[in-house]
Image (cartoon, rainbow, N blue to C red):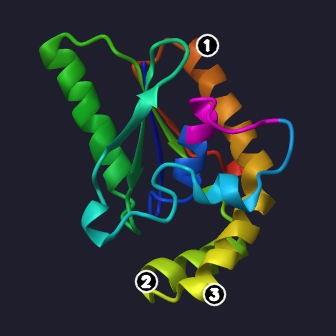
Amino acid sequence: MIYIYNDYGGTHTTSMAAAYHLKKLPTDRKLTKEEILNIDYFNKLTQSDMGKIIFHGEDEDGNSVYTIGRKSSKLVVPALKNLSILLQDKCKVHEKIIFSNTSPTVPFAMTMGGFLSRELKIDFIGLPLLVIGAKQCCHDILRLVEHTKQIGKSTNTKVIVLENKRFK
């Protein structure tokens, strides 16, 4: 199975989701500033990384975990879904693929922090806001990851797109 977490920038909630999925973060408490800033790819991607599918590792069941930043395009995930189905049919690939949108978990502090840090390069304001936002949404992201994994294990659909609107 392949899991692909996606959102606008692909560097904050998606990186957190991948880290939770791969059991790289504690699940019994809010994250510390140090834990947040040490998450692979957290606040490290640039404009040139948008649209790239980034491998984060394999989970305990041998499933691959990826992230992608899709910017404001509503076409990226549907296009990837259609391409996935085409490749599965034509190449006889039987790997299930789950696209899970982490955008609903993004709090306002993270939106502002990401904009200030990634777009305007004002890290002394942006980073503290990102940390505040990450602490606010860490439990929602963990629940989203658990839901994503449960759906992956419980359905036979070849390609699944989860919008995750219930995690707002």
In which quadrant of the rendered image does the N terminus lie? top left
Please indicate, yes or no, whether residue 120 appears anywhere in the rendered image: yes
Identify the residue at horizontal 77%, vertical 60% (top origin): 135
Q: Which mark is residue 36?
A: none
Please indicate, yes or no, whether residue 168 appears anywhere in the rendered image: no
The image shows residue 101 at horizontal and vertical percentages of 54, 48
Q: Amino acid at mark 1?
A: Ser
Q: Which mark is residue 119?
A: 2
Q: Are marks 1 and 2 in contact (CB under 8 Å)?
A: no
| Lower position in the chain sequence, tag 3 or tag 1 | 3
The image shows residue 77 at horizontal and vertical percentages of 37, 47
Name the front one of labels 3 and 1: 3
In the displayed structure, 29 sits above or below 21; it is: below
In which quadrant of the rendered image does the C terminus lie? bottom right
Determine which residue is flagged by label 3.
125
Residue span colored magenta: 19-27
